[in-house]
Each structure stands twice: as C-alpha cells, then as structure tokens.
Amino acid sequence: MPRPTRVALLITLPLVLVSFYFFYSIELHVLLPTLTDASTRHRVVTGLSSILAGKYRAVHHSLHEYDHYTTEPYTGDRQAFTRHIVAVGDLHGDLPNAKRVLKFSGVTDAYGNWTGDVDFFVQTGDIIDRGDDTIALFFLMDRLRAQAHAVGGTVLSHLGNHEWMNAIGDWRYVYPTEIKTFGSIAARQKMISTGRIGRSWAGNYTTASRLPLHPSIGPPNTPYPPKSMKLHYHKQSDDLAIHHYYDHDKPLSHSALSFVHGGLSPTYKGLTPFPTKINQLSESLLQKLQHRVQPPPHPPNSYPGLPVGTTPEEAALYDANGPLWYRGWAMDSEKKVCAQVDKVLAQTGTRRMIMGHTPDFKNIVARCNGKIIIIDTGISHAYGGVLSALSIHYTLTPIGDDSDQRWIEKEVVSAIYADRQEVLIRDTREVVGDFSL
Ligand SMILES: *[C@@H]1O[C@H](CO)[C@@H](O)[C@H](O)[C@H]1NC(C)=O
Ligand SMILES: *[C@@H]1O[C@H](CO)[C@@H](O)[C@H](O)[C@H]1NC(C)=O
C-alpha cells in the first residue's frame, strides 16, 4: 500500500466512527422516542439497561420478542386457539375443602355447578380415605362430569393408591365414621365394587392419562407413540402423514401433559404405548378386584392381597415403582430427577408430568423448569395443608402472513391458592405448521 493511502485511511477511519456514533445518538435519543410508543420505549430502555447491568438473558429477550409479535395486529383468516386446564390433587374425604378449591379455581360457580370456563378439569386420585365425605365427593365428580359433558368440557378422573387400597380390601385409612355413611361394611363393599361408585371407577376413572394441549395431536389418551395412521384429526381434508404430528422435531409433537397419581418411574416397564398400557392393566386388575367375593376388610382381618390370577404386570402396576405409589419425582435430588425426566417425557410424548401423592403442605412444587409438577398440597383437613389448584392456559395465536403458517405457542402454568396466584412457568415459542381446526 503506498504511503499517502495509508495516511488517508488513518484520518478517515476515526471520522467515520465519530459520524456513525453521531447518527446513532440522534436515532436513539431523538428519532426512537418520536417513532415508537411509550411501551416500546420502555422495553428498549429496560433492555439497554439490563445489557449494561449485565443481566441480559436470551430467554427474556425472546419473551419480549414474542409479546411484541402477539400485540402485532393480525389480519389473516386463521383463528387463535385457547385451552384452559385445571388440575387438583388429593382430596381425602373433605367435601367442603374440595368445593372451595373448585370454586376459586373457576371450575364451579357460586352454586357449585360447572362454569364452562374450564375445558378440562383433572383430578389425580385419592378422593377416598382420611375423611367422611367419600360418597358426596364421588357423586360430585360424576355430576360435574355430566355438566361438563353437556357443554363440551371434560372431567378426567384418576384412581389413586387409596382407591386401589379400598378395592383390595386394605381399609387401614378408612374412618369408622365414614363407614357409617354407607350404612355398613357390606354396603360399602358393594358400593365401591359393583355399586354406583365402583362402576364409575371402572367406567370413568383411569390410572394414567395423556392430555394434548392442542386438538391437532388427537383427543385425550390417544396412544403414544401412535400405532395407526388413522388419528382422530379434526380437519377432514388433512392428508398429512401422522409423523407430521409425532415427529420429535415437529413443533407440537410433545405438546401434551401426563397425569398420574404417584409418578411415572423411569424404570417402570409399562410406559409405552402411553397411557394405554397402564390403563389396560388398570382395567383388568380392577375388574378382578371388583368381581371377586369381597374379602373381609383389613384391619381387623388379615391383608387380603391381590386376587388369585393377578398377572406379574398387573402386580407391577400396584407396586412401589408403579404409577400409583412411585415417589421418586418428589423425593429424589434435583440433579437426579432432572437427569431422568427427559427420557420419560420422550417415551410418553409429553412436555410435563403432573402428579399428586407426595404432599408439600405449603405449595405446588414445580421441578426441572416445570417438567415435573407435584400438586398434592394436603388439601384435606386430615392434613391441614394449603388449598390449591394448578391452572394451565394454552394459546396458539396466528401471526404474520397466513401463507407462512406462523403461530405463537404460549403456555402459562400457575398455582392458584385461596388468596393468591403464582405463575410457575411461562413458556413461549414460535411454531410453524397448519394447526387450523
Ligand atoms: C345447578 O345445577 C343443578 C343441576 O345439577 C340445577 O338444578 C340448578 O338449577 C343449577 N343451579 C344454577 C344456579 O344454575
Ligand atoms: C360416568 O359418569 C357419567 C357422568 O357423570 C355417569 O352418568 C355415568 O353413570 C358414569 N359411568 C358409570 C359406569 O358409572
């Protein structure tokens, strides 16, 4: 390079930099404030100050971005989709507390009737034992199920280890005063086997469930992974391969939740197809229990055990590592559970596992960034824990041009208590695909 050129460069470079900074300042301090509204300005300023404070995190950045997207005016033809799910844990014989929870979580109105504001109400089992209101609670669940059904809502009920204990004849946690509400031991045995409550367990309750967040991946309890290409897909004209919805890399393939009473152990053998395998075993074992000659209850009689003819797989369903009793997700260290959880989520085609069984008397517990949620807070007076419900608001909002099929998928998971609400997880992402209904 000749000498004069190098000199010229040394002079012009600082000039370029200074003028660049000059225009940048004008844009920042003069143009930006006049071009944008107050909330954008606020975002820019807080964004810049967090960068300066070293607090800048990618996740916040993207959330701001998405909030920005969803406030963009949208003029296409696609409809936004919303789904509201409320889940409640162990109720243990306490009707007044159950009614309070149903009311403050928006499932029921002031008269105790289904409001219609919730699309799915999920109860994770252990309605029976430790209280007197067994009959009233199971009847309440059936009434809500019917009211929900009439307006397109769904009640998903689960059997907990205590329902199973009672079906087995293990009545260690039955209050003597509760037996009186049935009239006699024999009347109680009949009611929970072939009588009204027992029939509802067999017909309306499962041991596990898989609840999709969006209907394009099927109705509740569609087996995962799917066996057949014939999924109950709502859109008639759809000819996309099933893999479109279940491929691990596809955006909504794992937009589903699992519910179970105890927990889905990583070493439990019957995880797939999910929840079909578990529920088939549950159905066949319950059938054997309800249709045997009801054994005299334990105590004072000896523990009756599982019926003659119980298969090893059915026995495993009810053992300590099975979905009714497993406590690992609640009790093991953060490091251990977070290392194990992804594999179970992948096997069950879900994003979060929600369970009861192991109470925390103060609050709902979310672990591993909400991949594990434990909703037993000891609601019954037998425990005196806090009254709680889990609420999930899922939305899929169209953005951009319809031809691009871009959507913002958003999930807000909150714990609702009698006097407050706490957002546990706010998950937002952009997804691309044909999710129109
Ligand atoms: C609540 O539902 C019951 C039926 O279960 C009905 O008789 C009653 O009128 C309803 N109450 C109100 C206020 O809607
Ligand atoms: C299941 O629940 C519905 C709705 O409450 C009820 O009408 C029905 O009798 C229940 N099924 C059985 C088998 O009890």
Image (cartoon, helix red, strand yellow):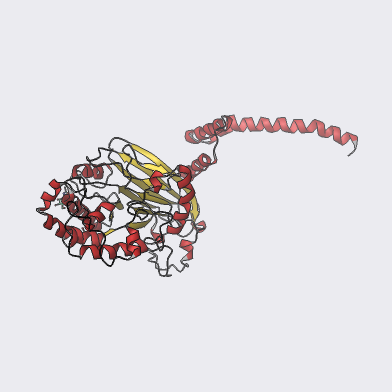
Query: Can you say whether 278 is above or below 379 in the image?
Result: below
Q: Can residue 32 be seen in this view?
A: yes
Indicate whether 15 appears above or below 393: above
Measuring from the top left, give residue 346's x and y in whole percent. Answer: 46, 56
- Say if 368 sits above or below 17 in the image: below
Q: Where is residue 392 in the image (x, y as percent from the top left)?
A: 36, 47
In the image, farthest residue toward the front: 302
Choose between 417 and 404: the one closer to the eye. 417
Quadrant of image for the N terminus: top right
Is 250 placed left or right of 324 in the picture? right
* Residue sitting farthest toward the right: 2
x, y (%) of residue 246?
46, 62
Q: Where is residue 65 in the image (x, y as percent from the top left)?
A: 51, 43
Determine the residue positioned at 24% across, 43% down.
Answer: 103
Q: Quadrant of residue 15?
A: top right
The answer to whether residue 160 is visible is no
